[in-house]
Image (cartoon, grey):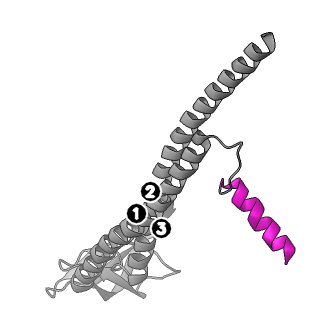
Amino acid sequence: MHWIWTRLDRGRRRLGLDRNNLRRGIDRLQWALATALLMLFFAVAPTAATAIADRVYVSGLRTELREAATRHQVDASIVGPGASPRSSPGNTSRPTVRMRWPAPDGSHRTGDVPLRSQAVSGARQRIWVDRSGAVTVQPRRHVQTIGDAIYAAAGTATGVGTLLLMAYGLLRRHCDRRRAELWESEWAHLDRGRAI
């Protein structure tokens, strides 16, 4: 149990929370301003992160609802090979197949669609189409909305923390300069005292 108190006492002294006569006013000022910046982080970061995450989440929900209302799956038939491979995310080419599917107005549409699995002419595949019958991507999923909100919150908290750390870095640099000036002044005073 004694080692816990020893560690706490050592941590307290490292943070400048002791009555050490060797600590200067600049040391106490730096500690007080660092504590104020830390308190500012705990006051601002959660509030800002929550506000930004809420906006991103609401925007994502709107997108989910809009895309769910305007996109639906249809059964498409493969009618032949596609014209050329399509680029997908990551700059990889995926082979395409020519497909035919019913449009919402009752007409039939034909176009090239990326191939998802081995397919032969006449095989069926489910695809997503918009109101006009054009091929589109799957509607936004709720897990994407949650993920975006989490990333936005983490990014906001990181941004606030980074700004405050930069402010502390500038403060520390100024305090270090002032400490060096004080040391020089005291060394000069000691040298004058020895000369007498």
Q: Which class describes the residues within 10 Å of circle 3: few (<14), some (14-19), or many (20+)? A: some
Say whether marks 1 and 3 touch (CB < 8 Å): no
Mark 1 or 3, nearer chain start: 1
Residue at 25%, 83% (x, y): give it.
65
Identify the residue position indicated by label 2 in the image: 160
Amino acid found under the numbered disc labelled 2: Val
Q: Which class describes the residues within 10 Å of circle 2: few (<14), some (14-19), or many (20+)? A: some
Identify the residue position indicated by label 1 in the image: 44
Say whether marks 2 and 3 touch (CB < 8 Å): no
From which residue to which does the magenta span run?
Answer: 1-16
Q: Position of residue 40 (x, y in %)?
A: 44, 59
Mark 1 or 2, nearer chain start: 1
Amino acid found under the numbered disc labelled 3: Pro
Q: Position of residue 190 (x, y in %)?
A: 75, 20
Residue at 45%, 55% (x, y): give it.
159
- Element on which disc 3 rests: loop
The answer to whether residue 89 is seen in the rendering is no
Mark 2 or 3, nearer chain start: 3
Quadrant occupied by the C terminus: top right
Left or right placement of residue 192 versus residue 130 in this view: right
Q: Quadrant of residue 75?
A: bottom left
Identify the residue position indicated by label 3 in the image: 95
- Distance between mark 2 and mark 3 Cα atoms: 45 Å
